[in-house]
Amino acid sequence: MFDGNIPPQLAQLAALQVLDLSYNKLSGSIPCSFGNFTRMMISSVWKDNKDFIGMDGINFIYMYSLFLVMQGKESKYSEILYLVKTIDLSRNNLSGVIPEEIGALWQLGNLNLAGNHLVGIIPEKMGDMFSLESLDLSSNMLSGAIPQSISKLTFLDHLNLSYNNLSGRIPSGSQLDRLDDPSIYIGNAYLCGPPTSKNCSVDSVAPTSTSSYANGSETSIWLYLGMGIGFVVGFWGLYVVLLFHGTWRKIRELNTPAPINEEHNWDRLLKPFITVYMKSHTLMPTHHHLLLLVHLILMLSVIAIQTLAAYGCIEVEREALLTFKASISDGIRHSLSSWDEGQDCCRWRGVVCDNTTTRNICDNTTTRNILELNLRKPYQDSDNWTDYALSGEINPSLLALNHLTRLDLSYNNFAGISIPEFIASFNNLTYLNLSYSDFGGKIPHQLGNLSKLCYLDLSWSYFIGTVPPQLGNLSSLRYLSLNWAFNDTSTPNTNNLEWISQLASLKYLDFGYLNITNAVNWLHIINGLQSIRVLVMSSASLPSIPNSLPYVNFTSLTTLDLSNNWQFNTTLPSWLWNLTNLSYLNLRNCLFHGKIPDALGNLTSLIYLNLGDNNLEGPLPRSIGQLCNLRSIDLSYLRIGGDIRELVGMLGCKWTNMEEIILSSNKLQGNLSNWLQQMTNLKYLDLHNNSLVGSVPLGIGILHNLNGLDLSSNSVCGVISEAHFANLRKLDSL
């Protein structure tokens, strides 16, 4: 866990696209230099996750992946990691204002600054971040009005401004009219207008710096802390000064016009208070004054101590967590060791409470509700992963957490136990992640009762049976992953996909390595999901793929992976060329045949293209030269012939920007001279099993970014010297 200030020099990493410093103890302000992240300003991306295990050039298992919180949910990014541009500084102790320079990051897709102590206003220039899809500024101390410029963020799909001190009328227009969930603005007492129920009026009172709680139910923690610390420090300080500074005779002398010794600065500070005190009690004997003052100090100190001691999580929820812990093992490294420390469970690892406090007028306690349990196993990449993993039974005592909105038990070791059905009783749950935790049994159909659920990840499990169609009741669902969720994929894992048509808000769907042979009409169902952006159905045993559609409705799609569905055995479908927002397309090993049509050039947003290991024939269409954003291309095992220099030359947008080229197992001829050394951004080049001739040019030495090179099974000849590779310090595969 990091602490201290964020160094402004971090912005010198111009190629940085993913910055995640969340859940640390960082303090200080956000550097203004953050507006200099070049990769977050321009439309250029990288893809450096080509470290994979290949089996006959067919199946790919990416070894690099990240879990990132975006759009209010946590997602795993591997194959499309190179598309992500995000800054996450949430859950730290950052203070100060949000620098307006951050508005220059026009290509940033996700900005999360939640859970800090940021003050000031929301910068107007945030409206210039036109690529922003997710913005979370919740749980800070921001004030002022919400800038109207936010309504210009047409891609904004997730917004959270809750629990700040924002005021005024909520802006309307464009994308903000679609974000109509009142919880976006909850915890801002002085905001008004739709989608909240509070009407704006000319008499609306602006927030002041003094906190108070309505009806004695809610208040800010800082009010209690300030009272407690003030009483203890002030009165006990006064008592100590009076005790050691002199006699009560000297105190009485403060009432006389006699001058005060200039050496005693404390006299100056205390004189007004003591004078008032003594004038109101001039008839009392000295020892009565002392007894009264000591009594007052002790009474106020007790009140302050009670106030501080009473603050924390609700006792019944604390006991529920301890009961849960007693029923499981937290590994030999005791990942839940902090659960034995102190009474306030809001400070325990993985426990997140809300930012408002509840005042109980009966027992004078102040408590907070538990909202999140983030118990993902730490150190996922550790060789001794069981040292940290949770295992055992999940105790139903967790049902006491009535306000729970997020439950993450991923990357643990529950050894095939079934998902407890009582999880479906968390009515406020919006996020549920049970992936990579070895759950088994049947997927409980009761999960369909979680009406507020937005995120569900059950991937990499050992389930039996089929996917319950009750999941179609999750009308708020935006993310659904069942990748490799079933133990047996030799039989169908779903009877049909009709239930998916009810998930109108779905944006991310991953059915990779699921057997959905029975879903004959799968494409027509997917075509009805207008909001879908990511569709992964690799190795899903899809029975067929229609060549045409009466209309193409899912044009918002940016990622499509249908690889390793070898039952297709048809020509490339014509509806593909209408998906002009695609940036990632993987159709590898689907037994497509015929020619690659000129319409491929319609997909000008493509960054990654994989058509490898199919039966496609003929020359590449010249329209491929229109794919100016392309950074990675895989056309291996296609029996493409001709001179490789002509293939490179047909591209109108030069391949000098290319970072990954895979043209292996084709019939390419020619040599490597006069073109290879121009590809200065190249990171991986695979030309093995072709008919290339000539020598390896010395110019290869200027490809400083190259980390993988395969020229085997060609007729390349000549001498390879140290001069070829002296500057290729990143090269680790040859």
Image (cartoon, helix red, strand yellow):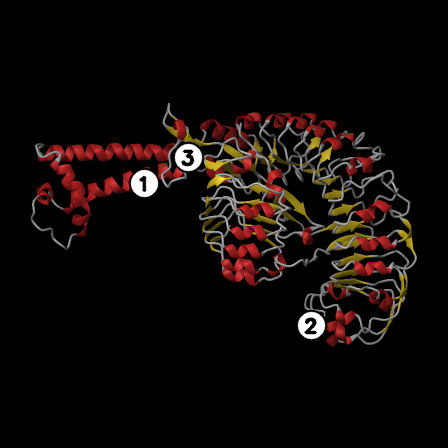
Residue position marked by numbered label 2 in the rendering: 727
Measured from the top left, where is residue 587 in percent x and y?
82, 49
Q: Nearer the viewer, mark 1 or mark 2?
A: 1
Determine whether the residue tagged by mark 3 lies in a helix, strand or loop: loop
Give the CA distance from mark 1 to mark 2: 62 Å
**Residue farthest front in this picture:** 202
- Is residue 49 positioned above or below 494 on the image? below
Residue position marked by numbered label 3 in the rendering: 203
Query: In the drawing, does residue 300 fall left or right of residue 207?
Result: left
Callout 3 environment at 10 Å: few (<14), some (14 to 19), or many (20+)?
few
Q: What residue type is labelled 1?
A: Ile
**Residue farthest top in this picture:** 362
Callout 2 environment at 10 Å: few (<14), some (14 to 19), or many (20+)?
some
Mark 1 vs mark 2: which is more N-terminal? 1
Residue position marked by numbered label 1 in the rendering: 229
Q: What residue type is labelled 2?
A: Asn
Q: Are marks 3 and 2 in contact (CB under 8 Å)?
A: no
Q: Which quadrant of the rendered structure holds the C terminus?
A: bottom right
Q: Which of marks 3 and 1 is in front?
A: 3
Mark 3 vs mark 1: which is more N-terminal? 3
* Residue 392 visible in the picture: yes
Q: Which of marks 3 and 2 is in front?
A: 3
Measured from the top left, where is residue 434 in percent x and y?
65, 36
Give the CA distance from mark 3 to mark 1: 35 Å
